Image (tube, rainbow, N blue to C red):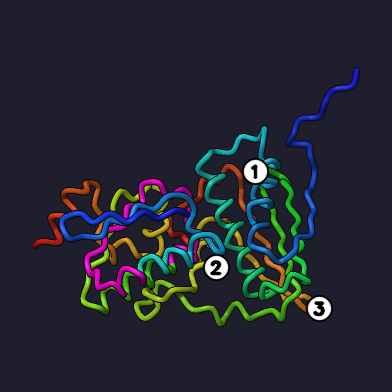
Amino acid sequence: MKANVREVQGVAVVDLKGKITIGSGDVQLREVINGLVEKGKKNILINMQEVTTIDSSGIGELVGCYTSVTNKGGKLKLLHLPPKINDVLTVTQLITVFDVYESESEALATYAA
Amino acid sequence: MTKTPPSHDAGPIRMSLSSRFENIELAQHLCGKLLDGREVSEETKHWLLMALREALANAIKHGNRQDVSKRIHVEMDVVGGNLQISIRDEGEGFDPATVEDPLAPENRLKTSGRGIFYMKTFMDDVRFRRLEGGGMEIVLTKNLGSGKEKEGNRT
């Protein structure tokens, strides 16, 4: 997995690419998000558009990231969820936990609200 | 004249893998090959390969505890329109009845505990068996024409 962090309108936008699976991307995701939290970044938007595969470990890390950001008083939201990842979140009823957006500008505007 | 048999006559695939996560994709690739030439929707294939991934990850992580000296034994075959996958580890085994429901409100935000749920969601049948000599076997079955996927149906 590759992760690129952009700062847009005070929000850390994390563009992920590749697999978030056990032994390949799951721990990396945690490290990237924890690194942002440690730097005081509270508003984080994860762009999932180029994530090709996710498994239960990747989902677990995503949930862990959500919890750690929320516990610090921040907001972690998701952007451009591929349909199959949407399905994986839906069957475990996690889709209602995350705020999910199809438009980056729309997502960014919600942080200012 | 000798004819090359179609790929769906490839017969069962049996393999023994070391307990490394990198081997998950090897097994997925071979499972995909077993399905080549059969009428299986891409949707069905995607979800059964995810279930296979979860079963292998469980066997490697929780079964063999990533001990590379322990093996994961995999058998795959298509019998009567059903894909059957058996995965055996060399670990201590576990009681499936003790696995918590990831949909319970108190478990919803846990960082683990969804693998077996995904297997049950995406396959038609999932069975666990403690092996006499130690280890656990999980048998996944999928009717290749059943179309049961992503429904959250755990029957």
Q: Residues within 10 Å of mark 1 (few under 14, many from 20)?
A: some
Q: Earlier in the sequence, mark 3 or mark 1?
A: 1
Per the image, is A42 magenta? yes
Residue A39 drawn at (x, y percent): 28, 72
Residue A38 drawn at (x, y percent): 31, 75
Same chain for labels 3 and 2? Say yes or no: yes
- The chain to which mark 3 is attached is B
Name the residue at the front extreme. A39
- The chain to which mark 2 is attached is B
In the picture, measured across the screen, residue A34 lies left or right of residue B142, that is: left
Name the residue at the left extreme. A113
Region of the chain picked out in magenta, as a range: A34-59
Marks 3/1: CA distance? 31 Å
Residue A42 drawn at (x, y percent): 23, 70
- Which residue is the site of mark 1? B32
Q: Hey, what amino acid is under mark 3?
A: Glu
Q: Is residue A20 visible?
A: yes
Instruction: Check contact, mark 3 vs mark 1: CB within 8 A.
Output: no
Residue A73 drawn at (x, y percent): 21, 76
Q: Is residue A86 visible?
A: no
- Which residue occupies the foreground of this view, B148 or B104? B104
Q: What secondary structure is found at the residue carrying circle 2?
A: helix
Q: Hey, what amino acid is under mark 2?
A: Ile
Q: What secondary structure is found at the residue carrying circle 1?
A: helix
Q: Residues within 10 Å of mark 2 (few under 14, many from 20)?
A: some
- Residue B116: which numbered mark, if any? 2
- Which residue is the site of mark 3? B132
Q: What secondary structure is found at the residue carrying circle 3?
A: loop
Q: Residue at x 75, y 60 (%)?
A: B17
